[in-house]
Amino acid sequence: MAGESGYLYLNAGNQWPGTALSAGLERTGGALALRRTGSGFATSGGFVAGPFQVSERPTAWFRAAATVRGGAAALGNSHIQFFTFVNAAGAAPWNPAAENPFTGPGWMAAPRDALDFAVRNAPGLQFFLGGLLRGDGSETPLLEQVRIFYGRDTYAKFLPPAYRREAEAADFLDRWLGPGQAVLGGIEGEIEDLPRLFDPAASPAGDPPSWLGWLSGWLAFVADEHWTEPEARENIARAFQWYGMRGTVEGLRHYLKIYAGVEAHIEEPAREARIWSLGEAGLLGFSTMLAPGPLQGAVVGASATMDQSHLTNGEDFGAALFEDVAHRFCVRVYCAELTRPGALETVRAVLDREKPAHTAYDLCVIEPLMRVAVQARVGIDTIVGAGPPQAGTDLPLDTGALAAQAETCETGERPAEGEDY
């Protein structure tokens, strides 16, 4: 007998190739059903499919599994019964006009309404499957698919060889284990597909709870409702990589981009603070400023009061110079990018969640204006309006292009096409 194992499908492309139907049967939406009549449905109809051959040697045809729309519980007052036939050559004998077309020699009947059953025929080259659908004329079963299993790839292979020494005993054992294997086969398939569930590019999405959502939860990576499915898959796939950037300027910029949709400018004043001295590099009143505390720390009679001051040690020398900028940073975002409802609150929530615990931040919204000492850095926070008013108009300073864009930022709407922001 052929040692190969596998399965075949009867319905391919909803066409049921190689399947002959009796007068009482028809194809309906890709399924086999009792033919519709003027008053309802035919009461009986049959089909035969085959021959199927998978080897040049006799094959052990093992079992068949059918799919009926709605399952066995949906049969109601209708019934379905299958018949199997195995030979070496030639056609299977059947009489489509008879009440039971499968009464000829060689046909083996499965239990009525059994959708998963063993093939009890002896091994052979060719396999035929027959089916008989019956009803009371008010309804019809809908047969959508039949899968034919061949070979004896059963759980018996995991048992000691003593169980398979006698052919009759081995055949009984295979058939006895078959129904249980059919039930557990779906679970085994899910286990085999388990690696796919852990791949963000292949994990099933859909309504929650979904596997994509589970992946996000396992990584403690908050998925945003504004993300499209491709964005969610990409962000979850890179979550572990981004965890390595948490607490950094680059990491904060990235999280603000994916969660709030803003391109943030983040500055750390401590990086620009320097200990200075007068000379070519330090001009008093221009490139220098007074520190919040003296360099040398506490000095009696100058910066210290007896019993109310403390001395700094060598490790903390000069620390007082940076008290007002240490562990602080400033985040600037464009008002025109805060278009989502609650976008500014989202920015704050992201900063509170992702910043280092010992730091504090200032959040500034860049509005459409240019003002020395407030917003005056070209390319960062200097935003000019669309242009001067038309000739002949006399507008006060609080109106015009700049005021119009300031109002735009307050309402959260984007400027009209052609305006800068």
Image: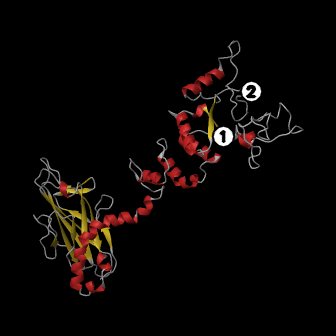
- Where 200 sits versus 181, above or below? above
CB-based contact (under 8 Å), mark 2 and mark 1? no
Residue lying furthest right in this view? 280
Whether residue 34 appears in this view of the structure is no
Q: Position of residue 270 (x, y in %)?
A: 72, 42
Task: Estimate the x, y position of residue 97 in percent, counting from the top left.
Answer: 12, 64
Horizontal arrangement in the rendering, residue 207 relative to residue 327 (left or right): left
- Number of callouts: 2
- Label 1 sits on a secondary structure element that is strand
> As rendered, which of 379 and 293 lies closer to the eye?
293
Checking the image for residue 328, the label placed there is 1
For residue 281, what is the image quadrant? top right
Q: Earlier in the sequence, mark 2 or mark 1?
A: 1
Q: Residues within 10 Å of mark 1 (few under 14, many from 20)?
A: some
Number of the label disc, if any, that sits on residue 372: 2
- Tell me the kind of residue under disc 2: Val
